Image (cartoon, rainbow, N blue to C red):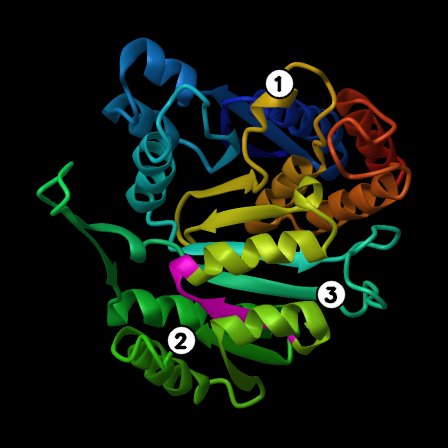
């Protein structure tokens, strides 16, 4: 009997629907090979709906998404909507609503992909960033006084709780154990953020006592950025807070070849997780059939892994690697293939593994 998974699709804005369509095509036409059936449902959350209805996430949306096993997201971001409205009102809302407390970002340089780091190879760039995904500066705490005047004061507070930090760090050590990683590095800023990141450091070394076979390391965020460029081979798993994780994962995308290959997951290990390419909506490429869908297909592979389909996930990754080596570039419009041709190539490799 085939396993059935209910997947909610959030194609979103810009090129999001195009890359989601390619990921869905790959899954729909290959899943029977792995004794799987995907049942897809669409949701129109995004900028276009907001402009028409002024709605962000409604109770109906939550009820629909709650009925799924996972969520596959294309992109959220519309040029006609003020920055922050969709991000706060949709992305952060969903992460908090479904308690997706881990943002998981593999940083892997695939064979045949060019990195801007001189002399570095796939053996050197292969680590994962585990980012706390619900608190920190993204918790939404803060406000204005004397808004719009020359006396205006704006505050943005970083919220850090023992509960959230502990479960994030424990996830990082469990991830290292599961995937045979040797070291977990805490990325923080204890010399300046002396309260919040002192708490992070204390919890980090306390949790580490339960994992005697895993090496530990610490780096200030600025030093971690430097070493990601100079010696990325030093890292296996990096665990960090929400803001620093947001920054260093974009740097990670660049050293692994660009946004066209970078995928991430918003993980609730015991609930509904949401997977996405991290490159954004890229509105200038919308409906031109030139955007790179590999990151979204990779996000679908991460989704398969989180659902427990490891063999399927590994084969999707192998098909992505084979396809990437045939492209002239990972950048939109420079690939030497159209968006749909890239999806077809991944599918063909996957079916022939």
State yes or no: residue 104 in magenta. Answer: no
Along the horizontal axis of the image, is 40 left or right of 200?
right
**Eyeballing the image, is 268 above or below 70?**
below
Q: Quadrant of the N terminus?
A: top right
Q: Give SS at disc 2.
A: loop
Residue 101: percent from left, percent from top: 38, 55
Q: Quadrant of the C terminus?
A: top right
Give the residue pinned by disc 3.
125
State yes or no: residue 237 in magenta. Answer: yes
Give the residue pinned by disc 1.
286
Q: Earlier in the sequence, mark 2 or mark 3?
A: 3
Distance from the alpha carbon under mark 2 to that under mark 1: 39 Å
> Which segment is the magenta one?
235-243
Q: How many neighbours does mark 1 have within 10 angstroms: few (below 14), some (14-19), or many (20 or more)?
A: some
Q: Earlier in the sequence, mark 3 or mark 1?
A: 3
Q: Residue at 68% of width from left, 67% of height from top?
A: 229
Quarter of image, res 237: bottom right
Residue 346 appears in the rendering:
yes
Q: Give SS at disc 3.
A: loop
Quarter of image, res 335: top right
Q: How many neighbours does mark 3 have within 10 angstroms: few (below 14), some (14-19), or many (20 or more)?
A: many
Along the horizontal axis of the image, is 174 left or right of 106?
left
Quarter of image, res 45: top left
Label disc, if present, on residue 312 of the rendered structure: none
**Eyeballing the image, is 68 above or below 92?**
above
Q: Residue at 88% of width from left, 28% of height from top?
A: 336
Furthest toward the front, the residue is: 150
Label disc, if present, on residue 189 of the rendered structure: 2
Residue 266: percent from left, percent from top: 46, 48
Q: Give SS at disc 1.
A: loop
Q: Residue at 51% of width from left, 33% of height from top?
A: 73
Cβ–Cβ under 8 Å for marks 3 and 1: no
């Amino acid at each position: 009997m085939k396993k059935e998974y209910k997947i909610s699709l959030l194609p979103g804005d810009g090129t999001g629907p195009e890359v989601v369509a390619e990921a869905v095509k790959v899954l729909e036409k290959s899943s029977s090979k792995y004794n799987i059936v995907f049942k897809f449902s669409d949701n129109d959350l995004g900028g276009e709906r907001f402009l028409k209805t002024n709605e962000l996430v409604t109770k109906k949306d939550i009820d629909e998404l709650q009925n799924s096993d996972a969520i596959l997201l294309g992109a959220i971001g519309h040029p006609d909507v003020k920055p922050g409205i969709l991000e706060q009102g949709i992305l952060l809302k969903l992460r908090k609503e479904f308690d997706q407390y881990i943002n998981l970002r593999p940083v892997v340089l695939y064979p045949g992909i060019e990195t801007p780091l001189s002399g570095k190879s796939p053996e050197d760039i292969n680590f994962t960033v585990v980012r706390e995904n619900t608190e920190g500066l993204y918790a939404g705490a803060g406000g204005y006084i004397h808004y719009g005047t020359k006396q205006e004061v704006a505050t943005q507070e970083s919220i850090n709780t023992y509960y959230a930090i502990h479960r994030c760090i424990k996830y990082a050590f469990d991830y290292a154990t599961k995937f045979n990683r040797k070291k977990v590095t805490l990325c923080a800023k204890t010399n300046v953020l002396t309260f919040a990141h002192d708490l992070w450091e204390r919890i980090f070394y306390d949790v580490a006592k339960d994992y005697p076979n895993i090496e530990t390391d610490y780096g200030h965020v600025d030093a971690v950025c430097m070493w990601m460029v100079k010696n990325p081979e030093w890292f296996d798993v990096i665990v960090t807070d929400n803001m620093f994780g947001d920054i260093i994962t974009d740097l990670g995308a660049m050293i692994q070849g660009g946004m066209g290959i970078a995928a991430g997951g918003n993980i609730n290990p015991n609930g509904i997780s949401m997977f996405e390419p991290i490159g954004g909506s890229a509105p200038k490429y919308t409906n031109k059939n030139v955007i790179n869908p590999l990151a979204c297909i990779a996000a679908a592979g991460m989704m398969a892994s989180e659902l427990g389909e490891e063999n399927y996930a590994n084969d999707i990754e192998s098909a992505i690697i084979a396809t990437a080596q045939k492209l002239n570039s990972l950048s939109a419009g420079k690939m030497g293939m159209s968006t749909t041709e890239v999806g077809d190539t991944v599918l063909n490799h996957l079916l022939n593994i």
